[in-house]
Amino acid sequence: MDTNVIISALESADSRHVEALAALIREQHQGYVISPVVYSELRARPDWSRYQNWLNLTRISVMWSMPQAVWELAGVRQGEYAQLRRSGNLPRRILPDFLIAAHAEHHGLDVMGFDRTVYDSVFTGLKLVDPMGN
């Protein structure tokens, strides 16, 4: 699960709040985990205790394993994305986006996230769960 879904689910003023909550309920049978990268992004928030409590309440755990293969894959795909970006009209992306996707692909997990740019561009074999239900 990408960070943006969790933030949207917990922030009632977020424009995607309803969709995030609906997606979490709709897909709850899947059993959720987050990568250490998502955990770190949530941990950096000033209201971390809210997120920590929510993770505990929902029993969403962190899949801590990020072996070298994950880091290698993230680097390779970030390079591929950079090449595509130079020749197209793709937005700039940061390393955590690639690490989250590489972590999921390495462990054979699906990813739920609102921003599909990185996944659609260079992680085409990764199964995506669309929070919007599409």
Image (spheres, rainbow, N blue to C red):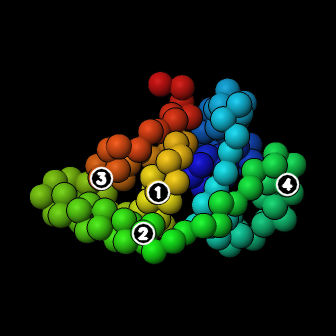
Where is residue 114 shown, x and y percent of the image?
50, 43
Per the rendering, the mark at residue 69 is 2
In this rendering, the count of numbered labels is: 4
Given the image, on which type of amino acid does mark 4 rest? Asn
Q: Which marked residue is nearer to the observer: mark 1 or mark 4?
A: 1
Question: Which mark sits nearer the N-terminus, 1 or 3?
Answer: 1
Mark 1 sits on what residue? 106
Q: Residue at x 23, y 62 (%)?
A: 80
Q: Secondary structure at mark 1?
A: helix
Question: Which mark sits nearer the N-terminus, 2 or 1?
Answer: 2
Mark 3 sits on what residue? 122
Quote the CA–CA distance across marks 2 and 1: 8 Å
- How crowded pointer 2 is (Cα within 10 Å; few <14, some 14-19, many 20+) is rated as few
Given the image, on which type of amino acid does mark 2 rest? Ala
Question: Which mark sits nearer the N-terminus, 4 or 3?
Answer: 4
Q: Secondary structure at mark 4?
A: helix
Where is residue 90 shown, x and y percent of the image?
26, 54
